[in-house]
Image (tube, rainbow, N blue to C red):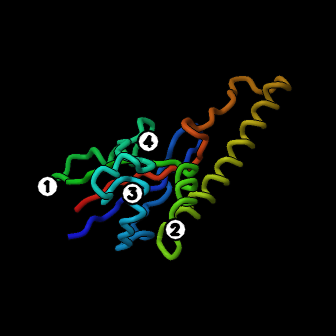
Amino acid sequence: MGTDIHGVIEGYTFEKWETMLDIAPLVHLDRTYDIWAHLFGVRAEDGQESQAVAYQRGLPADCSAEVQALHFEETEPPREFHDLTYLTYRQLHSAFTRVSITGTGWQIIEGVMALLHMRLKACYEHDRQRNEDLIEWGHGHGLTIPKPPGEDGSFARLIVYFDN
């Protein structure tokens, strides 16, 4: 029996993470174990798991409500999954400079995350500048400067888990 990957892409908007896309249609039956081993330590050779980019990080504390519900709802029978983890767009992009993703669903995932990251970053920069200007001009009563995303400044991240 093979291992399957599940997950979502989240985007950072208005100072919180929101679920943007389920990755299932992008990687359906795309069992790229070499990529999974490199990124997540799943199906890695014995002793190599901890060298993965995003090995067993768990769920981000600030993940979207949809992701929290997906992973923590009580289901009957209980879901059995393993290796819940995440990585940011910048971490994913950096990792793919060291492993080939040509001809896989991962090319699409990286492309979607790149577009999402660039678009959300541009929106954030616009809102930040607008609020700074309004505050400076005395018209920004009650406005604040929006906070950027934590970790590495990525405006997109991938949350995944696996089942057998």
Residue at 75% x, 33% y is: 131
Q: Nearer the viewer, residue 16 or 137?
A: 16
Q: What type is the residue that disc 4 sits on?
A: Cys
Q: Mark 4 points at which residue?
A: 63
Q: Earlier in the sequence, mark 4 or mark 3?
A: 3
Task: Give the x, y percent position of residue 118.
Answer: 67, 53
Label 1 or label 3, whichever lies nearer to me, is 3
Q: Mark 2 points at which residue?
A: 100
Label 4 or label 2, whichever lies nearer to me, is 2
Q: What type is the residue that disc 1 sits on?
A: Pro
Q: Name the residue under label 1.
A: 77
Label 1 or label 2, whichever lies nearer to me, is 2
Q: Mark 3 points at which residue?
A: 7
Residue at 47% x, 59% y is: 21
Q: Which of 128 and 89 is in front in this view?
A: 89
Mark 1 → mark 4, Cα distance in angstroms? 25 Å
Mark 4 → mark 2, Cα distance in angstroms? 29 Å
Q: Residues within 10 Å of mark 2 (few under 14, many from 20)?
A: few
Outermost residue, bottom side: 103
Q: What type is the residue that disc 2 sits on?
A: Ser
Q: What type is the residue that disc 3 sits on?
A: Gly
Q: Is residue 143 left or right of residue 112?
A: right
Q: Is residue 134 above or below residue 152?
A: above
Q: Is residue 144 above or below residue 62?
A: above
What element does badge 1 sit on? Answer: loop
Question: Are the two marked residues, 4 and 2, in contact with CB atoms closer than 8 angstroms?
Answer: no
